[in-house]
Image (tube, coloured by chain):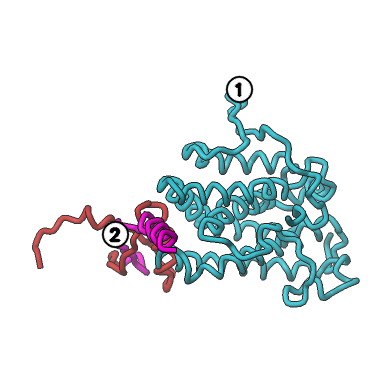
Chain colours: A red, B cyan
Amino acid sequence: MNSTITSASRRREALNETRVWQVYARRKYEEPLHEIGNVMADDVELAKVYARSIYDEFSWVEMVIIPRDCIVTVIES
Amino acid sequence: MAGTHVDNAALFAVLSSLADNKQAIGRRYAYWCNGAPALEAAVAAAAMTQDELGHARTLYPLLEDFTQAEPDPGQVEPMTRTLHYHLAYLDHDFQGWSDFVATNFLLDTAITTFFEAAQNSSYEPLRQRARKIVQEERIHEMHADGWVRRLAKVGGAVRSTLVASLNRLWDETLCWFGPNDDPNMQQLYREGIIDATPDELRSRYLQKIMPTLSSLEIEVPVSFHADTKRWELRQSLPWNSWDAITRRTSAD
């Protein structure tokens, strides 16, 4: 029983997403992109699918995702 | 086929199978809206569930216009329908997330291959729906591809569970297009309702899925022929256990 739980939790751990993607979108062409949230996915294609399905509350004219680890801090909060 | 009544048994049969499969996929996906490995995947599963049930909901009403629906009108309503022309694989709950991924990757892509072949259909109601479905299915294909890669690359038990799910669904999905002399599919091809024969549909399908399976070294009975630059099945399908009316293999 314990070994079943361990092996199941090991499998689940192996599937844990570690990469965070910031999601930006805009509703009108005259507006700038603004941050609407984030998703976790190790694969860029899955990150795109997740961003589209989670943040589908508006008909966006543009949506982009940026890996959080690519963001360079200029002024720290 | 103009007018409100369409008399076409072949089209009626294939549309019934398409609607039943979409409905059954939606119902199986629905179970995973709160059981996926991550919150993001659960939300994506919910969105895809909604899409699949939506596709079924646009297909069932088409059946009402057919002469073939008249003897038993209850069979064209999903709530009263007792016939099941979906794959036997969908008869039971998915055993795990890998069954979801396998269905998304193999079966949903196979059905989309059919809709791609119907985008210039001579039967206008199917043409309109096919274009919209193909558009919506692009995101499903990205999801399927991403998850097959993800599960396969984890290795060990995760990979072998995925491979087992793919293997269970493999033959029945390839059979769904029918043997090349399938009278219904051949009639649809002759009437310009779809632009491909069963063998051509199966070939188009293999060209779509094989690059992913091959790059992940997932073994399936398909070979790449360098001379034609095409993926081709290297063993025959189990037609003896496949039923041409229900378009499914006999359940175990």
Q: Chain of mark 1?
A: B
Query: Residue placed at 65% from the left, 57% from the top?
Result: B130
Q: Where are the magenta residues, as a range?
A: A1-30
Q: CA distance from mark 1 to mark 2?
A: 44 Å
Residue B7 placement, left or right of B252 = right
Residue B97 placement, left or right of A41 = right
Tell me the crowding category of disc 1: few under 14, some 14 to 19, or many 20 or more residues within 10 angstroms, Cα based. Answer: few
Residue B119 placement, left or right of B144 = right
Q: Which is more toward the observer, B101 or A53?
A: B101
Q: Amino acid at mark 1?
A: Asp
* Residue corresponding to mark 1: B227
Query: Residue placed at 29% from the left, 62% from the top?
Result: A22
Q: Which is more toward the observer, B134 or B164?
A: B164
Q: Amino acid at mark 2?
A: Val
Q: Which is more toward the observer, A66 or B156?
A: B156
Q: Quadrant of residue B23?
A: bottom right
* Residue corresponding to mark 2: A20
Q: Quadrant of residue B153?
A: top left
Q: Chain of mark 2?
A: A
Label 1 element class = loop
Please say if A38 is above or below A19.
below
| Percent coordinates x, y for residue B199 in the rendering | 73, 39
Q: Quadrant of the N terminus of chain B?
A: bottom right
| Percent coordinates x, y for residue B177 in the rendering | 73, 47
Please say if A51 is above or below B191.
below
Specify the farthest residue to the top.
B227
Q: Quadrant of the C terminus of chain B?
A: bottom right
